[in-house]
Image (cartoon, coloured by chain):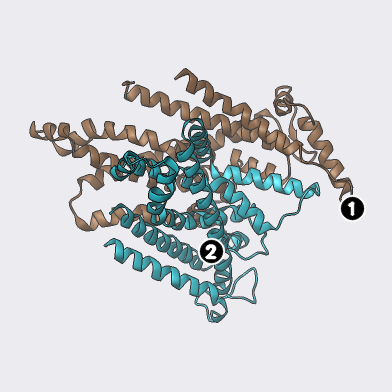
Amino acid sequence: MTPRAKGLVGLSLLLFLLALSALPRWVHACPFGMDLEFPTRTVCERALGGLGRSMALAGGVAGLTTALGILLALAAAQAKGPVDFAITRLSEFFFALPDILVLITMAFLLKTARDLGFMDPDPTLAVGASLSVIGWAVPALMFRARLQALGEAEFVAASRALGAGETWILVRHLLPRMKGFVLAVFLLRVPAVIFMESTISFLGFGLPPTTPSLGTYVGSNYRNLILGEWRIVLPVWGLLLLIAVGFSLLGKALMAGEEA
Amino acid sequence: MRVRFLRDLAIIPIVAFLVQALVVRLPVPVSDDAKRPQVVSLQAQMERDLGKGHALGFLRPWAKLARGEPLGNDQQGFDIRDLAAALGSSLRIGILGLALSLGWAYLYAWFRVRTRNPLDRRTLELLPDLIYATPPFFFALVLAIPLGTHLAGSRLPFEAAAALATALPAAAFFGQVLHGALAHEMGRPYVLTARAKGLSDDRVIWRHAMPNATLVLLDGAVPKVTLLLTGSFIAERVFNIHGFGYLYVYAAEQRQAALVVVGTTVFAALLVLVSLAAQAVRTWLDPRP
């Protein structure tokens, strides 16, 4: 499949998912039947109800972590020396930490802070903040590597020979060439965030069970799943599969376009 | 090497101190009367377990464990034997998961390099993408459904299923990394020389190319290995295995600060040990500086 075809398929899938998340009400006639935890609603309704929130949360977190990643990579490229070393080591440290462990620890700290009356953050914002804390390291490392590779290109050497300063090179030459790559990284981060959110919500450390999301939906139906109610999990798995494939195809198409 | 070893080792007390400091230093309000008894109780528990204002408060739970006293609350306490048993259970699952994922990775890389069938190639290319496109807890759920209905009461199948569920995402990653490295090695001159001397494809792969490709696997796999060894949270939860991940989730749910600090320190220590072990294996396989 050519990068262009991949991009088109990915984009079509994402538009289809967006349409689905915006129209959860038309799915009263669901082939998977009624939900067991909320018997007045269908399985499709509950799954699609969670899709919109999961995608909005993931889009916000992926956007924030991508922005943080590019800012840190630019700071590292501009300052070089100890600042570059510190940013890289910090990113590598966060990258090596087991995500779920950090998210559970943060959920514990937030719950304790709430119990002590110190703060009472909105659950969606709290989960978004926790996901952002662990999510910035991968984009930062990817952008730093990309900037380093671009920095060794001939046009940069030519610009430097003509007397251009480091900031000028960064802003005028390197940053414009990063646009597609930044977008691709953002797109590839979205499904990763959705998976992480659904995993911690499933464990009970993410969004509250009353807040619709793909993870809370599966988590609240956990007992029914163990009893063999496969039909409950199928629409969510299908949606997660479409999300991952759609974002991945679009992201990879953009990456291929950048490298060409 | 020694500097890196010391730097890695320093992570353990730093992580323990940070978690303890974050937990203990949360300011406590006095304005909300309704919450006051709960706040006072929680604060007293934290002060007893971690010591407010003590820089080395994170050592208190360890001292308690060393004296043979349990950590936790009045309802449920965990002594050093309970923690060791839980850690042993998680490590069993992790090591079995690691063995399964590495076994899969070597077979996947070998078969993908060897096969000439376009359908096989396409399927092998798509398989990791399918695994990546599925959240890890789904694998545990899919395996739990038959086990939950047919094998209740037996521990071993649950631990094996937990290992398999934990291993699948890592196996897909290891397989892709190893295949990429192996494909690169297969195009290098020493492989052509070996083939020209009449060695079979399998002999060339297993005797010459695979050991070199393994070095790349070691470089890229450390975070995933740590995840395998420490991150069986989901599988332990789904299969109701009382391992260290299950204990950690319980501690976080029940606000057991001392258990959270001990758990985080153990995970940080495992992270460091895995990293050091990977460095040692790499140096053993490739002694070049």
- Image-based side of A206 in relation to B205, left or right: right
Q: How many marks?
A: 2
**Residue on which disc 1 sits:** B34
Residue A195 visible in this rendered orientation of the protein? yes
The residue lying at 89 percent from left, 49 percent from top is B31
Within the image, what quadrant is residue B263 found in? Answer: top right
The answer for which chain carries disc 1 is B
User: Tag on residue A94?
Assistant: none
Chain drawn in brown: B
Where's residue B14, x and y in %? 62, 29
Q: Chain of mark 2?
A: A
Q: Around disc 2, counting alpha carbons within 10 Å, would you say few (fewer than 14), some (14 to 19), or many (20 or more)?
A: many
Does residue B44 sit above or below B169 in this rendering? Answer: above
**Element assignment for label 1:** loop
Residue flagged by tag 2: what amino acid is it?
A: Met
What is the x, y in percent for residue A185?
A: 43, 53
Determine whether the residue tagged by mark 2 lies in a helix, strand or loop: helix
Q: Which quadrant of the rendered structure holds the N terminus of chain B?
A: top left
